[in-house]
Image (tube, helix red, strand yellow):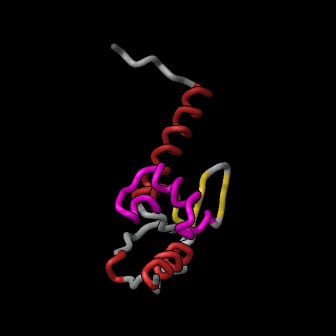
Amino acid sequence: MPRPEITGRKLRTHRRATAASRDEEQGEEDQGHEGGGGEQDDSNHSELGALDAPYLNANQVKHRYGDCSDMWLHRRLHDDSGFPPPDLVVNGRRFWRLSSLVRWERQRAAV
């Protein structure tokens, strides 16, 4: 089946939507690293040195804890585990600082 011809304003809107979704997918792969150009190797950074890293979105937080499910994250936010609430919420998207997550991990390890 041939693709319909998209021209003019619809084409510009389509290109923007495609670029935005591609950027969002790429941002998830980058694990929240901002900036352009060079690739960064996380193996060279100690966890303590990375505490000032940018915010982690919900997908990155789930990946940090073993690719857990949305329900796991929901349960941690609503049970008595002390899991930190999001540090930032933008348009319904939740973001955590790495330092908040590390603090929670250390509290759990001390118990």
Residue at 46 percent across and 77 percent down: it is 108
Q: Relative to residue 95, is residue 38 depicted above or below?
A: below
Identify the magenta region.
Answer: 60-86
Q: Position of residue 77 (x, y in %)?
A: 57, 59
Residue at 40 percent across and 70 percent down: it is 38
The front one of 43 and 67 is: 67
Q: Count the marks: how many?
A: 0
Q: Is residue 78 magenta?
A: yes
The front one of 19 and 21 is: 21
Q: Relative to residue 42, is residue 110 depicted above or below?
A: below
Q: Position of residue 105 (x, y in %)?
A: 46, 76
Residue at 47 percent across and 57 percent down: it is 27
Q: Position of residue 1 (x, y in %)?
A: 33, 13
Q: Relative to residue 92, is residue 8 depicted above or below?
A: above
Q: Position of residue 99 (x, y in %)?
A: 54, 78
The front one of 26 and 57 is: 57
